[in-house]
Amino acid sequence: MRLLLAEGAPLLLTALPEDMQEGLAEQMARMRTIDRATMTAVVEEFVGELEAVGLSFPGGLEGALAVMDGHISPTAATRLRRQAGAKGDPWERLVTMPAESLLKVLEEESVEVAAVMLSKLPVPKAADLLGKLPGEKARRVAYAVSMTGSVEPETVRRIGISLLTQLDAEPARAFTATPVERVGAILNVSAAMTRDDVLKGLDETDAAFAEQVRKAIFTFQHVPRRLLARDVPKVARVVDQGRLVTVVAAASTRPDLSEGVEFLLSNMSQRLAQALREDATARGRVKDKEAEEAMNSVVAGIRQLEVAGELVLVVEGEAD
């Protein structure tokens, strides 16, 4: 370890158990100098052990659960975490939790507890959460952070256990996506007539929910308003060219597609645009079902790029 530190290698010793960290520090305190031959022998032995490793396992329960994610039930994972909570460091898990979950607890807790939480979280996440609190509480919490210097480590640990208990008490969700997201995803690939009928019915039964669903929906008609022109070439690369030809051909008899088609053709390479126009002319009339399938392919390609972080869709109603 001394050699690695001297060479400037980053060592994440905090990932080791605390008793091992203490043992390392105590051993270093007892040592003075060693000769070069001994150092070389130790390094060779260490490298040999590393090269002999065939498989390694993550340290701690959270590491094991991360590897098993998707292969173990949420109920079993929660039970294991509760059993380990009394003897482990709760903050190791809290710092990895999504900001949305932490914000719910932060809004309900006292200013003092909120200050301790923000002090233990990574600075970017703490800043994000502080910015989402109401102005008055955010100011009080920020001031309370300055008073946390005298809080004992055991108190901080008990606060962490209490926060984890609250978060684990929330029932496991059967669906990861919200109802709005699920309905929006279904309507994205539904026929236009079906989509309009469903939205009309939602307007009559729950207008607020219907409005949220409309915001979640992304169809071919939204392309000119929500897709940035610079991202069109990316879309053209991931969508099957035959589907693009079908959409272009369908626009000749469906005025509702004209704006979206012209937007795509105007912002891709003109060589490809001309080829699509020529193929669309040769294709002739397109059945409505084929047109819907082709439009859904374009939308799916855009969504695929969005999920991959290759593009960001513009939110309607927001300034550029």
Image: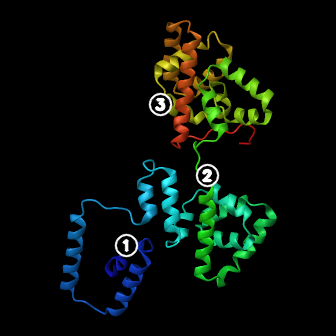
Mark 1 against mark 2, which lies toward the viewer? 2
Amino acid beneath label 2: Pro
Viewer-side residue, 218 vs 166: 166
Residue 136 point in image, percent of width and height: 81, 65
Give the total of numbered labels.
3
Query: x, y (%) of residue 173?
Result: 59, 46
What's the amino acid at mark 3?
Val
Left/right placement of residue 175 relative to residue 207 reads left
Labels 2, 3: front one: 2
Residue sitting at 66 percent across and 38 percent down? 179
Q: Return the mark for residue 171.
A: 2
Q: In which quadrant of the rendered view does residue 122 lie? A: bottom right
Q: Which residue is mark 1?
A: 9
The C terminus: image quadrant:
top right
Q: Is residue 133 above or below residue 171?
A: below
Residue 150 spot, x, y in % from top left: 66, 85
Residue depicted at x 63% and y 23%: 260
Q: Which sits earlier in the primary sequence, circle 1 or circle 2? A: 1
Which quadrant would the N terminus be assigned to in this image?
bottom left
- Seen in the picture, residue 281 relative to 123 is either above or below; the reply is above
In this view, the residue in front, 77 or 234, is 77
Identify the secondary structure beneath mark 1.
Answer: loop
Camera-side residue: 301 or 64? 64
Q: CA distance from mark 1 to mark 2?
A: 43 Å
The residues bearing labels 2 and 3 have C-alpha atoms spaced at a distance of: 39 Å
The image position of residue 232, as x and y in percent, is 56, 31
Looking at the image, residue 284 lies above or below residue 88: above
Q: Earlier in the sequence, mark 2 or mark 3?
A: 2
Is there a contact, CB below 8 Å, between mark 2 and mark 3?
no
Tag 3: Cα neighbours inside 10 Å, few (<14), some, or many (≥20)? some
Residue type highlighted by circle 1 = Ala
Q: Which residue is mark 3?
A: 238
